[in-house]
Image (cartoon, helix red, strand yellow):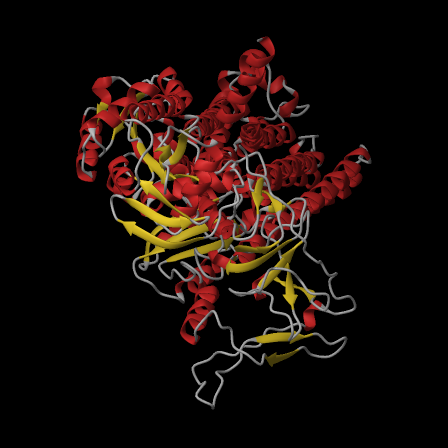
Amino acid sequence: MAATASRSPLHVTAPVRGVNPLLLRRLRLGRGGGCGKASTVQRFCLVVLPRGPAVATPRSTADPSASASSAVDAAAAAGEGEGASDAATVLLDVSGMMCGGCAARVRTILAADERVETAAVNLLAESAAVRLRSPEPAAGKELAARLTECGFPSVARRGGAASGASDSARKWREMAARKAELLTRSRGRVAFAWTLVALCCGSHATHFLHSLGIHVGHDILFDGLRAFKQGSPNMNSLVGFGSAAAFAISSVSLLNPELEWNSTFFDEPVMLLGFVLLGRSLEESARLKASSDMNELVSLLSPQSRLVVTSSSDDPSSDGVLNSDAITVEVPVDDVRVGDFILVLPGETIPVDGNVLGGSSFVDESMLTGESLPVPKEKGFPVFAGTVNWDGPLKIKATTTGPSSTIAKIVRMVEDAQAREAPVQRLADSIAGPFVYTVMTLSAATFSFWYYIGTHIFPEVLLNDISGPDGDSLLLSLKLAVDVLVVSCPCALGLATPTAILIGTSLGAKRGLLIRGGDVLERLAGIDAIVLDKTGTLTKGRPVVTSIASLAYEEAEILRLAAAVEKTALHPIANAIMEEAELLKLDIPATSGQLTEPGFGCLAEVDGCLVAVGTLDWVHNRFETKASSTELTDLGNHLEFVSSSEASSNHSKSIAYVGREGEGIIGAIAVSDVLRDDAKATVDRLQQEEILTFLLSGDRKEAVESIGRTVGIRSENIKSSLTPHEKAGIITALQGEGRRVAMVGDGINDAPSLAAADVGVAMRTNSKESAASDAASVVLLGNRLSQVMDALSLSKATMAKVHQNLAWAVAYNIVAIPIAAGVLLPQFDFAMTPSLSGGLMALSSIFVVSNSLLLQLHGSFQSTEKQREDLNSRLN
C-alpha cells in the first residue's frame, strides 16, 4: 500500500512587505555572561524595521534542546561545511581559450609551476582543476595571476574545489551570460560585415573602404597576434594571418600597378571574418545548449529563503504551526544557519537540507534521485535543497546549509568530474597543441611548392580564376597558402571530448547518476564483467514484513499488537514491523511494563493485557497456548510458503510469533530481506549485453545461491561466505584474465572491492556519506539497481560521441587541408577561396558541438522498461 501524505493545518503568513531584504543582517552575538550562564549561547530574532538597519536582540531564554557547545559546533559546521576548504585542490575560471591548443597551453603553464602535481583543463566549461603537491592557500591567486599575464584572464574560485552552492551557481550563470553576450555581439558583427559586402562596388577606392570592414573581427585579429607573440598561436592566429595576408596582397596589388596583377580581393578578409563570426555565433549557441543540463542543475540552488521570524511568545519548534503574529522574511540562502526555521510554500524550491517540522506535502526529488514520482513528506521526514515542494506548505528546520547541502555537493562533484580529463581527451589535446605550428608549416610548404615547382609542372593551373586574369604564379601561391591557414580547424579537436563529457556527466546527474569524470566514463564504457553484492544491492538491504498469519484475529490487529510491543525496540525485525504499521496507518496503542530478553523477544502490557512478540518457544512458554501443535506447525508452514512466494526467494526469513495473555499464540509475522523489484530485469539485461555477471557475498551459502538462482546468475559465478579482501582478490583475478570489471555494492564491507575494480558503483541507500560512496567512481543516488544499466548505457553513448567527434575532426583536417592546398587544382580545376575555407572551418566546430547535443536525446533504462510494460499491458 502506498503511503499518502495527510494534510495538517499550517497557518501561512505573507512575507513582510515594504522591507528591503538588503537591510536584514545576521549579527553574531557574544556569549551570555553573569548568573552562572556564561556557557549559554543566546538565541536571537531579527527585528524588521521599515527603514534603517536591522537590529538583533537576544531572546529571553536559551534553546533548551541544545547546549552551548553543541550550538557552537553546529554554527561552525554550518559556516565551513564538509570539504569547504581543500587547499590542495584549486579551481580556476579561465577565459580566453579558443581551441584545444589554448587548453594545452594553459595546462603547460600550470604544470610548469613546481607546486603543481597535476592540472586538468576543460575548454567548454572554461575552467582548470589544479592539484597541488602540498596545501597552499595563496597558490590559487598566484596561478590565476600567472595565466592572466600569459593572456588567459583567470580568477581563483572562492573556496577551491569545495566552493559553496552560491559560488557554483554564480559561476555558471556568469558563464552563460558571457556567452550570450558574445553570441549577440557576434551576430551584430556578422550583419555589419555582410552589409559591407552588399555595398561593395567595383572601384579600387570602394574596395579599400570596404576592407575597413575588417574591424568587425578585431578581437580575432588582436587575440591571434597576442597568442603568436606569446609563443602559443591558436585558431585566431591562423584566421588572423589569413585575413592579414589577403588584405596585404590586395593592398600591394592596388599600390603597385606595375606588378600587373590586375586583381584585388579586399572582400575576402571581410567575407572570411563574416563566415568565422557566423560560425562562432552558431557554435556559441550550441555550447549554451550543451551546458543547459548543468545550468538546469545549478538552477536548483535557490538564492533566497523564507526565514520564519517569530514573536517572543511563539516557539517555532513547538509543533510546526505558525501563530498569527509570526512573520517571515526573505533572506539570501547564504545567511541561513543550521537550526533556522524555513517556510516553503507550494511550488517553491526548498533552499536548504532539513527536517519537516510542520505541514505535509509531496516533494519532487527527480533532479536528485531520478525518481519520477513525487515523494510524500510529513513531520519528521528529511527534505533536501533543490527539490520542489508541490501542494502544501512545509515548515522545515535547517540541518545543513551552503556547501554542505546535498545539491551543492552534487554540483561540486559534477564540476570536478567535468574537470577530470579522459585519456582520449589528453591524446586529442596533445595533437591540438602543436597543430597550429604544423598548419603554419604546411602553409609555407604550399606556397613554396606552387611558386617554385607546381606552376612549372602544371602550367594549366594558371588559367584558374584564383591566379588572377594574367595567371600570376605568386598570386596563386599566396591564395592557396592563405586557404591552408584558414581551412584548418584545431577547435574541433579541442571540443570533441569536453562537449560530450560535459553533456554526459550533467545528464547523468539529472538522472541520479554521479559519475566522477571523463576517465570513469571511458572505463565504464569498456566494462565486460560486473560483480554484484547481495545485501543492499540485489536485495533491499533491510528486512520488511512479507506476510502475516493469524489464528484468531484480523491480520491488521496482529500487526497492531506487535507494533505496540516493538515500538521501543531497536533490532531490525522491530523496525520492519513498525514500518509496516506506519505504512498501513495503524493506530498503535500505548504500552507499559516493557520487558526485553535479547535474542528471544519482547513483552509489554497492551490494552490491559500482556502481549509477547518473539520466538515460538519463548512466546509459548510465556502463555498457555490454546492452539494445538499441528495448528502452530501449519501456521509456520503457511508463513514459509507465503513469504517465499512474495519475496521471490526462500532465504533469511525470520518469523516473529505474537502471543496474548489468556489466549497464547494468536498469530505470526514473517520478516525477510527481499529482492529489489528491478533486480531480475537488470541481471537479464546485463546478460543480454554479454556482460559476465558474478554474485559475491559474505552471507551463508544457501541464502546467496537462492538469490543468485532467482535472478538468473550461473551457479559457477556465485560465491558465498567471502571476506571483503577475498572479494577484492576475486576481482583482481578477473582483471588478470583481461576482464574489465565493475563492482556494485553499498556497504563499508564493499569498499575494498569497489576500490579494486576498474569502476566501483555504490548504491546510495541513505542520504549520509558512506565509505562505499567515497571509494566508488559512480554513485547511484536513486538507489535503484536498474541505474547500473543507465550508467553503462550513458557511458557507451557518451564515448561513442567522443569517438565520432574525434573521427570527424581528424578526417576533416586530413581531407580539407590538402584540398585547400590545391591538390584538386591540376585535374579538376578546383580551388577554394579564403572565405569558403573560413566557412568550412566554422562548420567543422559546429558539427562537433551539435553531434554532442544529440546525447540529450538518450533515454534511460527505467523509462524504456516502463514503455515496454505499458505496451505489454495494452497488448494483453
User: Considering only vertical position in the picture, is 335 above or below 833?
Assistant: below
Q: Locate the C terminus by quadrant.
A: top right
Total numbered labels: 0
Q: Does residue 516 show up?
A: no
Residue at (32% x, 17% y) in the render: 712
Query: Picture quarter containing residue 656?
Result: top left
Residue at (68% x, 34% y) in the render: 268
Q: Does residue 13 show up?
A: yes
Front-most of 740 and 522? 740
Query: Left or right of 497: which side holds 306?
Result: right
Front-most of 31 and 159? 31
Query: Left or right of 315: which side holds 729?
Result: left
Estimate the x, y position of residue 587 in percent, counting from the top left: 53, 45
Estimate the x, y position of residue 686 in percent, counting from the top left: 37, 21
Judged from this view, the residue extending furthest toward the bottom is 34
Front-most of 385 and 250? 385
Estimate the x, y position of residue 270 in percent, counting from the top left: 70, 38
Judged from this view, the residue extending furthest toward the top is 875
Residue at (55% x, 38% y) in the render: 3
Front-most of 497 and 542? 542
Query: Left or right of 791: which side holds 351?
Result: right
Estimate the x, y position of residue 355 in percent, counting from the top left: 53, 55
